[in-house]
Image (cartoon, helix red, strand yellow):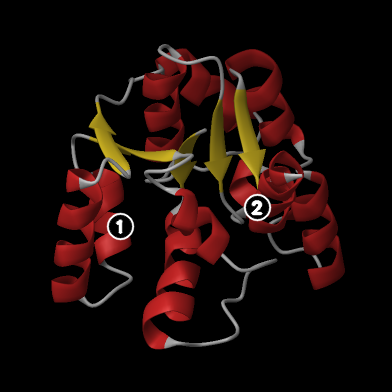
Amino acid sequence: MNLVIDANIFAGYYKESVIGLNDNNLTSSTIPIFNRLGINDKCYFDCDGMICLEWKSLAEPEWFDVWYADSLRDAKIVEIQAESCVALKKTLRLKGFPSSKDIWYIRTCKGVKDRNSSIFLITEDLDFYDPAKKNCPHKTRIKILKASSGEVAKHLKKKENILVKSVIKYNEIINSEAN
């Protein structure tokens, strides 16, 4: 499958796999997602380096440089041209999506989408689901993430064929695929 993975998911992976922390502050373990890269899945980055810079800022830089180079070599990560998608940015802003670097994930998804039938955006940032609920109680947040619901996620799925999924939801998908 084709993936674009938000930095908050990479941060969880780094905490789990490199630092050895049991609590990654996410809905589930990220290790199954990253273990599939290069085998079943590919992770796409923008060739402008915006996603790479954000990920690198969350890890030890020397470790990240080696990991990233190895991931490119092993075709776990593919760099592509992100689309500008001006109209989509305007539409998402009307739904509360902030004007921030997060748009690079959607722009990168759009670059992949034109070549493939669908793409998964793996994130637990509520801006990609329902920005109005950004400061909601923890139980509500988990409910939104488990349901992959919210105005932004629904729009991206219906209009752009970008499937916004939390770690737990994507792990459910890959587990059902294995059975």
Q: Quadrant of residue 158?
A: top right
The structure residue drawn at horizontal position 44% and vertical position 29%, both measured from the top left corner, is 109
Q: Amino acid at mark 2?
A: Leu
Q: Is residue 39 above or below residue 135?
A: above
Q: Amino acid at mark 1?
A: Glu
90, 171: nearer the viewer: 171
Q: Quadrant of residue 115?
A: top left
Residue 165 in the image: state x and y as whole percent. 66, 44
Give the secondary structure at mark 2.
helix
Ranked by sequence position, the earlier of labels 2 and 1 is 1
- Judging by the rendered image, the residue that carries numbered circle 1 is 54
How dense is the environment of label 1, judged by Cα within 10 Å: few (below 14), some, or many (20 and up)?
some
Residue 76 in the image: state x and y as whole percent. 32, 45
103, 143: nearer the viewer: 143
Q: Is residue 112 above or below residue 64?
A: above
Q: Which disc, if any, is residue 126?
A: 2
78, 38: nearer the viewer: 38
Give the secondary structure at mark 1.
helix
Residue 163 in the image: state x and y as whole percent. 63, 32
Q: Is residue 53 above or below residue 104?
A: below
How dense is the environment of label 2, judged by Cα within 10 Å: few (below 14), some, or many (20 and up)?
many
